[in-house]
Amino acid sequence: MRIAVIGGSTAGLATALRLQQSGHDVSIWERRMGAPTGGFGLLLTPSVSDGIERIGIDLSDRVHPIEQCEILDGEGSSILSRPLQAVAGIGRLALVESLMTALQPGTIHTGSSFVGFEADAKGPVKAALFSDGTRVEAELFIGADGVRSQVRQCHIPGPSLTPVRTVELVGICRQDRVPEAMRGRFLKTIRIGEGISIGLVPASDDSIIWYVQLDPRRWPQALLPQEQRQRWLLNEIQRWPVQVEETISRSDLNQVHLWRTTDRDLSPTFHRDNVLLVGDAAHPLLTFTSQGTGSAIEDALAIGDILDDHDSAGEAEMDHALREFARIRRPVLRERLLMGRRMQQQFLRPSRHCQLEVPVCS
Ligand SMILES: Cc1cc2nc3c(=O)[nH]c(=O)nc-3n(C[C@H](O)[C@H](O)[C@H](O)COP(=O)(O)OP(=O)(O)OC[C@H]3O[C@@H](n4cnc5c(N)ncnc54)[C@H](O)[C@@H]3O)c2cc1C
């Protein structure tokens, strides 16, 4: 089957790769010009690592195994300490490049920004249209164009994004070698009741990703212009545990990214006609869960398996196959969505009786 994937980040690349493995004729249309840039890193849970292996990618020499999760309070006392199994940190570019390299040559077309579909008044979509004038015909279109998906907006709008309630400052500390005290450890410090926490995750043997989660109503400094924000951050980290202070102060603070977390109710379905959404386009998750990339990889495997098992030759058959995707994926995603909301709620309004949830264990 001819399949056009719109968006060439983790969801689009993994989906294309999985579908190529089943012999489909897949192309990717990505807005970005040239090679991928941007992003820091993420945590791979065991199920995600298995999924990546299933699509033929060996990441063993690109990950940093994380064997211990430590959660501290503002004074540096342990709130939770738990061993982790088969969890690893990885740089986002390392993951994206590994997926890209495994695709058949000529799959990815960059500099192509999707603008709309060409469809009959009734019936399936015929072609996708791009800002550079390109018109791409396919039997199936997959929107993997992220949280503010244009594919979703054009064809399957569903629930709107809810207003941002938390923000994150994300950065990376590059060193010759991750210090011994941080090797193999995911370290999170929570100032309970203050609406601020800081996480450190080694993403390779020479880099540590860090993120500062904030309630912007209590910490408006996070939204200041870059230079003022840097000054505030360097001052603020003085009262945090030494690993936090050392990691952030040794980072290039010009490279810090302000992430506005997004949330959206789950749609009853992820498709209409022959257009399917995957990854963040289908179901953004709050960053508290650390499950965005994992869920995107799982989507890729799920749609590959479903198309292998279903006849999708006609309109009704295609509809049935894509309905099956939502039937399988919704329960898992719903649980993660609720988990993210519980974690956000606990972060914004902590209660002493609340159970601490550790995303990397689920
Ligand atoms: C530059 C960047 C850096 C990131 N860094 C991190 C990180 O460090 N840690 C982390 O946990 N998560 C990061 N993420 C988010 C993470 O990739 C996703 O939450 C998750 O992996 C799901 O991926 P996705 O492919 O569904 O969405 P995304 O990763 O958001 O990818 C969407 C893709 O679609 C493309 N696109 C958007 N609109 C159009 C259009 N109209 N036409 C064609 N293409 C379009 C975008 O350029 C992008 O490549 C980053 C995302 C991006 C885009």
Image (tube, rainbow, N blue to C red):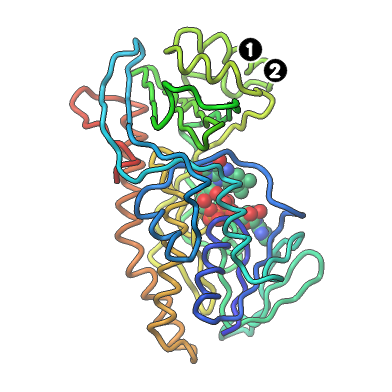
Q: Residue at x 53, y 46 (%)?
A: 62
Q: Residue furthest bottom?
A: 314
Few, some or many C-alpha atoms within 10 Å of disc 2 (few <14, some 14-19, many ≥20)?
A: few
Q: Is residue 146 visible in the rendered structure shown here? A: no
Q: Is residue 77 visible in the rendered structure shown here? A: yes
Q: Which residue is mark 2?
A: 227
Q: Are marks 2 and 1 in contact (CB under 8 Å)?
A: yes
Q: Residue furthest right?
A: 132
Residue type, mark 2 in image: Glu
Q: Residue at x 52, y 15 (%)?
A: 246
Q: Position of residue 124 (x, y in %)?
A: 57, 83
Instruction: Relative to 355, say whether 234 is above or below.
Output: above
- The secondary element bearing badge 2 is classed as helix
Q: Residue at x 43, y 67 (%)?
A: 301
Q: How many marks?
A: 2
Mark 1 CB lies closer than 8 A to ligand 1: no
Depth order, front residue of 277/116: 277
- The secondary element bearing badge 1 is classed as helix
Instruction: Choose top left, top right, bottom left or bottom right for residue 349.
Output: top left
Mark 2 CB lies closer than 8 A to ligand 1: no
170 left or right of 270 in image: right
Instruction: Relative to 70, say whether 164 is above or below.
Output: below
Few, some or many C-alpha atoms within 10 Å of disc 1 (few <14, some 14-19, many ≥20)?
A: few
Q: Position of residue 233 (x, y in %)?
A: 57, 15
Q: Residue at x 49, y 26 (%)?
A: 212
Q: Which residue is mark 1?
A: 231
Q: Residue 76 has which mark?
A: none
- Separation of residues labelled 2 and 1 (CA atoms): 6 Å
Residue type, mark 1 in image: Arg
Q: Position of residue 10 (x, y in %)?
A: 55, 56
